[in-house]
Image (tube, rainbow, N blue to C red):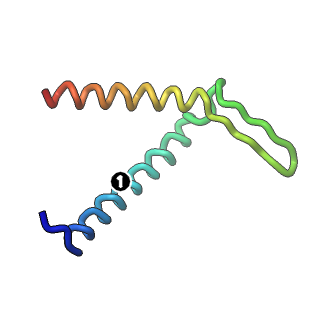
Amino acid sequence: MDFGPQQIGKWLIAAGVIIALSGGLVMLSGRIGLFKLPGDLDFGSKNWRIYLPIASCIIISIILTALLWVIRYLRR
């Protein structure tokens, strides 16, 4: 397999599309309230803030696990 500038360009375009789609999903999930769940911890004061999205990470993990399981099941 020849790994020249053409192939690198295709990989960079694919990576850019994936990053753009991921950014869109994060923006959409923030609007529907995914990162405001009761298990998400938010500490802070006037000058600093720490945000730990524990419940949101669990929900995202369950969704990705189910999605990857379905893809693997359909590839058999």
Residue farthest to the right?
46
The amino acid type, in three-letter code, at marker 1 is Ile
Q: Residue 24 versus residue 55: which sits nearer the camera?
A: 55
- Asked whether, in this view, residue 50 is left or right of residue 31, the answer is right
Q: Quadrant of the C terminus?
A: top left
Residue 37, given in percent of the width and then of the height, sits at 62, 28
Q: Quadrant of the N terminus?
A: bottom left
Q: For residue 69, what is the image quadrant?
A: top left
The 10 Å Cα crowd at callout 1, few under 14, some 14 to 19, many 20 or more, is: few
Residue 36, given in percent of the width and then of the height, sits at 63, 33
- Asked whether, in this view, residue 76 is left or right of residue 71, the answer is left
Q: Is residue 36 above or below residue 2?
A: above
Residue 54, given in percent of the width and then of the height, sits at 61, 29
- Asked whether, in this view, residue 6 is left or right of residue 64, the answer is left
Residue drawn at (58%, 26%) of the image: 55
Q: For residue 51, what is the image quadrant?
A: top right
Q: Residue 71 versus residue 26: which sits nearer the camera?
A: 71
Q: How many marks?
A: 1
- Asked whether, in this view, residue 15 is left or right of residue 50, the answer is left
- Secondary structure under the numbered disc 1 in the rendered image: helix
Instruction: State the residue position of label 1.
Output: 18
